[in-house]
Amino acid sequence: MGNASTRRAGTLRRRPRAGWLRAGNVLPAVAALTALFLVLAALVPGWLAPADPLAIDPVAAFRGPSGAHWLGTDESGRDIYSRIVHGARPSLLIGAAATALGLGLALLLGLAAGLGGRWLDAGVGRIVEVLLALPGLLLALVFIALAGPGVATTIVAVGLSTAPGYARIIRTQVRALRTSPMIEAARVLGHSPARILARHLLPNALGPVLVLATLGIGQAVVWASALSFLGLGEAPPAPEWGAMLAAGRTYLGFAWWMTFFPGLAIVATAASSTVLGRSLQRRAVGA
Amino acid sequence: MADTALLGSSGGGFPRPGGTAVVPRAGRWRGAGFWLVRRIGSAVFVLWAVATLIFLAIRLIPGDPAEAIMGGPGSQASAAALEAARAEYGLDEPLWVQYLSQLGRLATGDLGTSYALKVPVVQLLADQLPGTLGLAVGAWVLAWILALGLALWSGLGGRGAAVVGSALEIAAASVPHFWLGSVLVLLFSTAWGWLPPVSNGSAAGLVMPVVTLALPLAGFLGQVMRESMLTAMNSPFALSAHARGESESGVVLRHALRHAALPGVALSGWALGSLVSGAVVVESIFARPGLGRSLLQAVTLRDVPLVTGVALVSALAYVVVMAVSELAERAIDPRTRDR
């Protein structure tokens, strides 16, 4: 992108000093560790939290954080830490599936708009505009009102509402690539459109898409948990962060840990995905 | 939501509707009239498309609308009652008749009757709109103040401020409304008792909802504003201003601040979406009457007319905000005027 050259010229004035205190180093490292923990929790929750997330122990209800229960227990004496660790899998799965769906849809729209003629571009632009006019959660709620709540609905709803933003970025990317010397050369060499698409356009458009996916998963997790917080996603006994948080709100006055820690897990997921996505993005731009 | 980070650095590389129009240089009035016609046309199109999409979706998704009118699948309404509901709401007519008559009613401002509350949707919306509007406008103003302040401080305060500021922004942007609201209630109501935990109509009851709604938005806006401001500070025109002997604060106030505000204005449509989405959650947390809370109730009861009404109001607000933000962008940035 053209940004790189102007940015490099700009470093005349503010040259980043080498040192440990740099946003460029510290934040991504912390984010990568958090992401590693979350992925481990999603893959092998038993390693990180041996306790059963559904085991009821009424005697130990509403215990605060302690050595036995690191993050306390809930109203039925279930261990919050185990529930958060075991909740990583559904949350990340929903987030990843929704992001994949949104990006897939956006790739279709973006490629059609970027490669097609003027009319196709204008048509897709209109579709995207209409989708953008309905804010994410509203679109999801409309969809749930029509299709009823559930995990599948949540995935489709969140995926659908993230698609228009991605589609615009992919379109811009494809448009820029299409007129690039590289593609022109391939065309002059007589390569077929299918080959140009597969060998040149897609691999080059995929980098930004991966960055978008990294940025997007965290947001998708937040939205999915928002839906279950509102009582429209996963139901309470299941260890799901948004549902746990909603359940904890009833006891906010004397059992703050029931609300605080599940929320912290959501914040950590969203923040680490943002930080990782942005550092990938910076690397891709070459600044 | 995630696309803001990219939009910030690329400055919104896609043409906005109307933005690419060739405005005749002779005669400002003709240009303005053309712009207005385009804007109204695009608004009508968006509203029509939203209404059509929802109409189609209702018919495509399995389930009997008459059952929803009678209180959902659990109500076990009798066949005669279902039949009566079908006749009353015109559901026994052919699809295209239903579609055209619905469009006709929408065109005259009739949004139908709520299935659950049996009250005209327009009246419900008019009752609920002021509460949500106050909340959203308050949060928007607060978010701008916080974001500009944070961008200025972290962009100019040296390396330490940059690290702290960027961490603060990312934290604020990553905090979901429902958690932030709960934590604020925990601190300011439960622990210290300074503010009421639910909205009771007083000014004090408005503080926590507004702050809850504003902070995540401020985080997002702060990120893009700081980036745009730093780009401006490193640009040739800032260098030449420095060379002319202008002070650091002079360059910031005269040049960088303008550039910090630009992406914030450009993202207004997106910010509105974030506020509407957030209002659903915030109103439900603080038991505040408003559009968001009615929408949530409507969704649980599958009250399609009310859901459609809220969606249309929100889409209309989006179209208006986009038009205003485009005007504001032209006022702030001279480069966009001759496009």
Image (cartoon, helix red, strand yellow):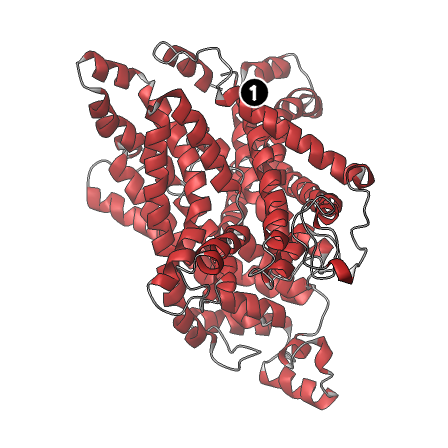
Picture coordinates of residue A188 (x, y %)?
A: 61, 13
Q: Height in image: A167 above or below A275?
A: below
Q: Height in image: B67 above or below B243?
A: below
Q: Element under label 1?
A: helix
Examine the image and state in which quarter residue A85 appears. top right
Picture coordinates of residue A103 (x, y %)?
A: 64, 39
Residue B203 seen from this side = yes
- In the picture as drawn, the residue positioned furthest to the left comes out as B245
Q: Is residue A53 left or right of residue A269?
A: right
Front residue of B308/A71: it is A71
Rendered residue at 79%/37% (across/down): A43
Rendered residue at 44%/40% (across/down): B219
Residue that badge 1 annotates: A284
Q: Is residue A165 left or right of residue B65?
A: left
Picture coordinates of residue B169 (x, y %)?
A: 45, 36
Picture coordinates of residue A49 (x, y %)?
A: 78, 42
Examine the image and state in which quarter residue A280 appears. top right
Amino acid type at image mark 1: Ala
Front residue of B274/A257: it is A257
